[in-house]
Amino acid sequence: MEDIWQLLTENRQREDGLRWEGTFRDYLHLVEANPVIAETAHARIHQMIVGAGTAQARGRTTFKFFADEIFGLDETVERLVQEYFHPAARRLDVRKRILLLMGPVSGGKSTLVNLLKKGLERFTLTDAGAVYAIAECPMHEDPLHLVPYRLRPELERRLGVHIEGSLCPSCRLRLRDAYAGKMEEVRVKRVFFSEEDRVGIGTFSPSDPKSQDIADLTGSIDFSTITEFGSESDPRAYRFDGELNVANRGLMEFQEMLKADEKFLWNLLSLSQEGNFKAGRFALISADELIVAHSNENEYRAFIANKKNEALHSRIIVFRIPYNLRVSDEVRIYEKLINSSDLQDVHLAPHALKTASIFSVLSRLRESRKQGVDLMKKLRLYDGEEVTGYKEGDVAELRAESDDEGMSGVDPRYVINRISSALIRKEVPCLNALDLLRSLKDGLDQHPSINRDERERLLNLISLARQEYDELAKKEVQKAFVYSYEESARTLLANYLDNVEAYCNWQRVKDPLTGEEMNPDEHLMRSIEEQIGVTENQKRSFREEILIRLSTYARRGKTFDYNSHERLREAIEKKLFSDLKDVVKITTSTKTPDEQQLKRINGVVARLIETHGYCAHCANELLKYTGSLLNR
């Protein structure tokens, strides 16, 4: 317990050490030393994202700021940063646009906005993200607004900053009355953004237009003080506590913006373009904030179709947030959601989440017009797998075929609901792929928005996902049955390479036991090559390709192994599995195994547990299921 109290004490001391308060004169010295503290809201957010670091993946820039929470949207996030936040940070006109994230439900829009909000809270606790404001200002205003307009050009030149906006009514009154116009004495303090404390981050959510008041956005008259101050235009009789007020210097989230009544959107016209808004009986109030909204595609189309909204059309920049289309990233989404629950004690068999992810991603893909490309090939290509006959450039062509791919299909929320249902109902502490597919299928009957045709399509996709799992299951068991699999693969590879080298160089092969020179073993080479569809006419070019790769590795001082060539690795595996298939079939399907078979089964179960992540229950279930598959 003492350690916990020490941790809490150290945290409080660290936060106390970040606090700063001084005069406007003191603040100008801070700006002179570090002009970055006077940057705009958009520049601050861009620095927060870029400052977290970047990496290169799949030929794209990935931003570590989003890496642990947003999966499969690398391209979208890269465009968002490069086409919106970066130019906005450089004071280009895009900063005068409302950022609208548009996409299907449960696609990651809210998660992305929450990341920005929580990130800002953490960033303002760092030196790089320090924010200073006029003390006691209800809008935590930029202290540089104290500088008169006529002096700003000279101050901007000397300090290397830009000064935009004017004092809010409250600060204008306090400067006149409390400080007698002496701006250098105005108190300035460091502020820390917090959505809960309503500092720098605001959130507006539409509700019933009849009951919701515009004051939720712009603040309201304080009727308890109006008799004291005598006028509605006195700042002391007004509460500057609307979402646009509190979000000044930071970010304002407009949830489901296009569902809001038109009168709430009118305030955004001036704010987005001119950086100010109208509140009460005051002049226009300056605000520097990122307005980020989100909505679905149907509401956006209805909004665009309404001519009354034309003034707002040009003030919105739309970014589509589609569903993820990569199986590996879909698995990460489900892992994240499960790990945040209290169900970590339930064991998930290997490939369970992958099989569910295959189904959900398949539902989001469009049929390709490219000959020979079915949904499964497309799924594999999108996930970065090698598919015979296709190159990386084909992926870009496939994506270009459908600009709305990923904007519909099964959403992650439905899948995680069905996974949760299966986890809760499962009587044994283990869940496999078949359990998840069964739960996904049962959920279709309970889904009110799915019509008969769509249900039939999704059932077919569940069948496709099961076929993929069947292949994974057979390969997993066959691998486990191979004694010293790696050694067997290396031996077979070495024999193949010796024969290929002799074949291509018109040489003979020496028998390792007798030393006798023989012709290359054509039967061995063809038995491997046929596993991956290499025809008789193609065999020489394939063997020469292998020999070239082998020579390249040798020149570079690298070791060529059976993982060094994707297609050859696949051929070696299939050859080994083919030779072993009958043994696996007999051993897994027998109801009364003899001593030798029982020993082999126990050895396979042990290998599945030790090296493949299975528990005893799901390993035995896998063996039974694979036996039934091989006997069909």
Image (cartoon, rainbow, N blue to C red):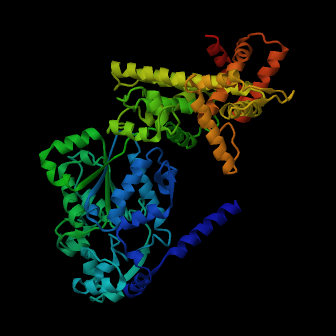
Q: Image height check: is 338 above or below 433? A: below
In the displayed orientation, state which residue is furthest to the left: 307
Q: Where is residue 357 in the image (x, y as percent from the top left)?
A: 50, 33
- The quadrant where residue 148 appears: bottom left
Quadrant (top left/top right/bottom left/bottom right) for the N terminus: bottom right
Q: Where is residue 376 in the image (x, y as percent from the top left)?
A: 47, 28
Number of numbered discs on residues: 0
Q: Position of residue 514 (x, y in %)?
A: 87, 27
Q: Image height check: is 619 above or below 108? A: above
- The quadrant where residue 225 appears: bottom left
In the displayed orientation, state which residue is furthest to the right: 514
Can you see residue 608? yes
- On screen, residue 234 versus residue 612, left or right, reads left
Q: Position of residue 51 (x, y in %)?
A: 48, 64
Residue ID at (42%, 28%): 373
| Residue closest to the eye, 232 or 491 | 491
Residue ID at (39%, 80%): 188
